[in-house]
Amino acid sequence: MLKILVIENHSIVRAGINSLLTKEDGLHIIANAESAGEALDLLKGGLEPDVILTDLHLEDSCGITLSKTLKQEYPDIKVVILTMETDDRYLSQAFKAGVAGYVLKETDFDELLYGIRKVGQNKQFVCSGVTSRLSKRLANEREFRQQSPVSVDLSRREMEILALLADGFTNTEIADRLFTSRRTVEGHRQSLLNKAGVRNTPELIKFAMLNGLLELSTVG
C-alpha cells in the first residue's frame, strides 16, 4: 500500500486528486496540506508517506525547493511534481533537487496513476506530455547539430547503462539487471557524465539524444 501526502493550495484541485486516488487499490492518501510549511509540520509530527504529490508553485515555497529539503531530511520519501509548467528547465531543476516524478496537470488520470506507482517502485517518471515536447525540441536542435555531432567513445557496457538510465532504472536496479555491483554501475555512470561533460542524468540523456547515442523515443 503506497501512502500518499498531497500538497496543493487550490482546494478544488486537491479535492479532485483525493476523489480520484482514493478509489484506487494499493494507494492511500494519508494527509493533505495546503503549503510546504504545513507538510513539513506533518512530517515532523510523525507522518510517514511513501510518496508526496506536490504542486510546483506553492503559496509559501516552490516544489523544487521543498524537494531539496525533503531529500536532506527525509531521503526515503519520493516526490512527484504535478504542474502546468512545460519548460524543460523546471524539469532539469526538479531532478537535480531529487524529484522522482514530473507530471503535467493536463495528463490523463491513468498516466498519473502509472507514474505514482512507478515512483513507488523506486523508478523515475516523466509524463508523456513533457517527453513529447522535449523530443520535438531536441529533434529541431539535432537538425542543426547533425553535421558536427560530438564524438564520444563509449564501451558496450556504458551504452547498456546509458540505455537503462534513460529508461528510468536506478543504479541498484541496473546492477541487478547486469549482474554487477552498484559501485560498478555508479563508476560507469560517472564516466558517462565525464565523457559527456555534463553534471547529472537528465543532462546526460539530453546529450545522448542530441548526439545520436539514444533514439528520441527512448525516454518516456
Image: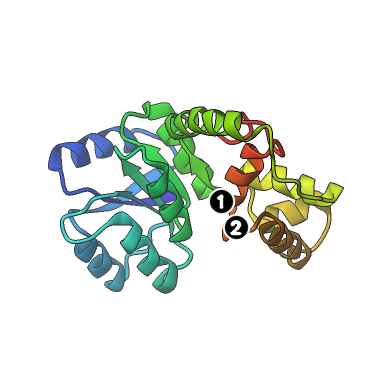
Alpha-carbon distance for marks 1 and 2?
Answer: 6 Å
How many numbered marks appear?
Answer: 2
- The image quadrant that residue 163 belongs to is top right
Type of colouring? rainbow
Closer to us: 19 or 57: 57
Residue found at x 21% / y 42%: 14
Find residue 198 and name its label.
Answer: 2
Closer to us: 47 or 87: 87
Residue found at x 45% / y 30%: 133
Amino acid at pointer 2? Val
Residue found at x 64% / y 58%: 197
Q: Position of residue 217 (x, y in %)?
A: 61, 29
Q: Position of residue 212 (x, y in %)?
A: 70, 36
Mark 1 is surrounded, within 10 Å at the Cα level, by few (under 14), some (14 to 19) or many (20 or more) other residues, namely some
Which residue is label 1 attached to?
203
Q: Position of residue 115 (x, y in %)?
A: 47, 39
Q: Are marks 1 and 2 in contact (CB under 8 Å)?
A: yes
Residue found at x 85% / y 47%: 156
Q: Position of residue 146 (x, y in %)?
A: 66, 32
Q: Label 1: state its secondary structure.
A: helix
- The image quadrant that residue 21 belongs to is top left
